[in-house]
Image (cartoon, rainbow, N blue to C red):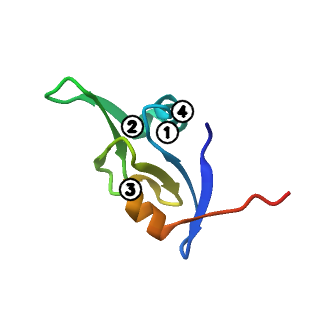
Amino acid sequence: MTPQTFHDPGGPVQAMQYTAETADAVLAWIPADRQRILVDGTEERCLYVLNPDRIYERVWFGDWVIRDAFGWFAMRPATFQRKYERTEVQA
């Protein structure tokens, strides 16, 4: 699994959806200095990304992790689908 390219009026972004099946690939894609794995009160391992505001933001299963010109952030699936369109690869 590799990041896919999407676009909105602001330009292209790379994104991967964070699921149980893609978790390892997403973690490998995000630079180590931009992510944290923490354990919450239920002993669940939780992913956080360092967003452009320099705040660690929780990434839930199903969220999209996005990399744009400003940095990394997470977005809920419904919002992602409304905002971004997949960029077709030219052959």
Kind of residue indicated by mark 1: Ile
Identify the residue under disc 4: 25
The answer to whether marks 4 and 2 mark residues whose Cβ atoms lie closer than 8 Å is no
| Image quarter of residue 76 | bottom left
Amino acid type at circle 3 is Met
Tell me if label 2 and label 3 are in contact, CB under 8 Å. no
Q: Which residue is under mark 1?
A: 30
| Label whose residue precedes the other's in the sequence (4 or 2) | 4
Residue occupied by mark 2: 35
Q: Find residue 46 and report its horizontal and vertical position in percent.
A: 29, 33
Dot 2 and dot 1 residues touching (CB under 8 Å): yes
Q: Amino acid at mark 4?
A: Ala
Residue 75: mark = 3
Residue 13: x and y, percent? Answer: 57, 59
> Please, which residue is most extreme toward the bottom here?
9
Q: In the figure, 78 relative to 40: above or below?
A: below
Question: Which mark is first along the chain, 1 or 3?
Answer: 1
